Image: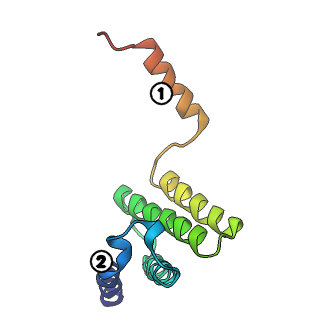
Amino acid sequence: MYGDFNRIVVQLVQHPVMHKPLSDLTYTESELAYALIRELIDLSTEGDYTLLDYIQMARLEYYLGELSCKINCIREETALHYAGALHLLEKGGFDLGIKKWVELVSLRIENPKKE
């Protein structure tokens, strides 16, 4: 498994997706990048994930959303990738809920910076 994972990482590093903005990728380049990232996700087994692992997986899932939108623009598929990225962040311990937002904003309001 690690050999396949490492091989795909090397292919991704050598792929134009690493050197061009998403908007400049050809359709074929976008499809290949999507396939490589999908393989990386499939090879990553969720075991003893650390916070960093969840963040890294969320990055991959988010970029799949970006590529999915460029390749075929099926909103449902794209939304699933973005939702998957958020889900991974939550599993990693990030509280993305509105209660946490209010809590943090309240702290700022209570303790404004002195200038």
Q: Position of residue 70 (x, y in %)?
A: 57, 70
Residue 3 sits above or below residue 114 on the image: below
Where disc 2 sits, the SS reads helix
Measure the C-alpha gap from mark 2 to mark 1.
38 Å
Where disc 1 sits, the SS reads helix
Q: How many marks?
A: 2
How crowded pointer 2 is (Cα within 10 Å; few <14, some 14-19, many 20+) is rated as: few
Which numbered marker is on residue 32?
none
Q: Position of residue 93 (x, y in %)?
A: 46, 49
2 vs 1, front mark: 2
Q: Residue at x 36, y 77 (%)?
A: 16
Amino acid type indicated by mark 1: Leu
Q: Which quadrant, please, contains the C terminus?
A: top left
Coloring scheme of the render?
Answer: rainbow
Q: Which quadrant, please, contains the N terminus?
A: bottom left
Lower sequence index among marks 2 and 1: 2
In terms of depth relative to the viewer, which is nearer, 91 or 75? 75
Residue under label 1? 104
- Left or right: 112 in relation to 68: left
Residue under label 2? 13
Amino acid type indicated by mark 2: Val
Q: Residue at x 45, y 67 (%)?
A: 22
- Left or right: 62 in relation to 10: right
Q: Residue at x 35, y 58 (%)?
A: 52
